[in-house]
Image: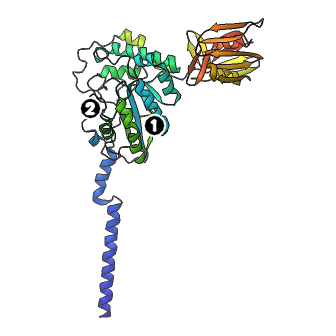
Amino acid sequence: MRDNKKARSRGMLLRGLLLMIVGILAVTGCGIVTGQTTVLQKNPPVTAVHSFNSTEKYSSVTVLPNTTLVSQASTLAAEDKETQKTVYLTFDDGPSPVTADVLEILKKEGVKATFFVLGSGAKNHPGLINAIWEQGHAIGNHSYNHNYQELYSGFTAFWKQIKITEEIIRGITGTRPQLIRAPGGTSGHFDDTYFYLLKQAGYLVMDWNVDSGDSKRRGVPSAEIIKESVPNTKASHVVLLMHDGGGHEESAKALPEIIARYKAAGYTFGVLDNSVTPVQFRVSSPRVGSERIKPSAAWVASNITANSALFEPEKPLVVEVGKKEVVLNSGEYRIVKGQYVVPMRSVIERLGGKASWERDIYSGKATLNGRSFLADVKNKELIFSGVNGEVSVRKGNVEMIGGAIWIPLRDLLEIVEHPLIATTVSSAERRVTAE
């Protein structure tokens, strides 16, 4: 009897151990469920780059489905296994008065975003472009006037607007935007020529994978924008399309709640740049652009081929003043109409001088080598004492860019009595030598 009880106990123990082993296998993804888990890992949300075969003139686009944004919730539903989730807030069609509200909210929330701006808006609101840049947001190119008929009549027309807008932005921030977003998105607008030539020219085309729906009709309410902006919180990378052009006050109103929901879901907020895998829609039909005239080989050679060099790091500029040297790296100086333009305070202080901001007169004050001068940003003037003590004024390129006053290097050196001796350019550096 006692032996039978022992046998039954051993049998129950063995069955219990077997059940535990089966449970462990199921939980760890082994056995039957392994195939399903592998499938999910191989199919993360689509955030692929538009790819080209460099041996072909133009190649097919096989990235995102033609986006009438076919169920963006289902596009994002597949759970990505990456641990870090990032959302990229993007705003199109600004700057406008709405942009100021958006910037205030982003600053309050401690969040960065990417603004795809229109050249016409940038021209009319340079202060807002400067504010975007100063707050550390990214700026992308969204054409000059958003006119579909003109932009998609042919690539050269699109290119012209991109370059005009690029120069306007560069004139305000000192940098060229490498990011481009096509008005209305690339789907139904871009053919292979647009994608290929923009890539060859060094640009990064960026669409989106979540549409806030704030532009599908006039006056979309903030509640609807919030709902569309956060369809789910499982995708690892979200590029959210919103608008900050005129009439999009509801988008600004929805923004705090959108940010709150992504924060609650564990997302970090990023800005787009060339390290982010682009989201691009594929060419919706071979018929798109079939009637457009492709640019000639001569046009491509004169416009596209050398353009990518504009985004390569510039040679350092070495400023040699007596026995001192200051090295300005790429982004720390500009070349405007053949002249070096530099951040006044940075150069003055590195040469051993002092500089300060005089808020009441909206000017910068600098002292070097016993000589002082004012850089009047409002009137674009350099004010200093002449040789005989008289007040002298030089009209010139005095600009506030990214929170710093930029002035011509030649003017700076001459005013502090270190006139130029020579300027040289080698394969390794640019050099300015002064007394």
Identify the amino acid type marked 1.
Gly
x and y, in percent, of residue 407 in the image: 62, 15
Quarter location, residue 267: top left
x and y, in percent, of residue 101 in the image: 43, 30
x and y, in percent, of residue 269 in the image: 45, 39
Viewer can see residue 279: no
Farthest residue toward the bottom?
A: 1
Residue 253 against residue 434 in the figure, above or below: below
Q: Quadrant of the N terminus?
A: bottom left
Colour mapping used in the image: rainbow
> Are dots 2 and 1 in contact, CB under 8 Å?
no
Circle number at residue 270: 1
Q: Residues within 10 Å of mark 1 (few under 14, many from 20)?
A: many
Residue 240 against residue 360 in the figure, above or below: below
x and y, in percent, of residue 196 in the image: 35, 22
Viewer can see residue 229: yes
Q: Quadrant of the C terminus?
A: top right
Residue 25 against residue 213 in the figure, above or below: below
Identify the amino acid type marked 2.
Thr
Q: Which residue is mark 2?
A: 67
Q: How many marks?
A: 2
Per the image, label 1 sits on a secondary structure element best described as: loop
Circle number at residue 256: none
Quarter location, residue 69: top left
Q: What residue is drawn where x is 36% and y is 37%? A: 254
Quarter location, residue 343: top right
Per the image, label 2 sits on a secondary structure element best described as: loop
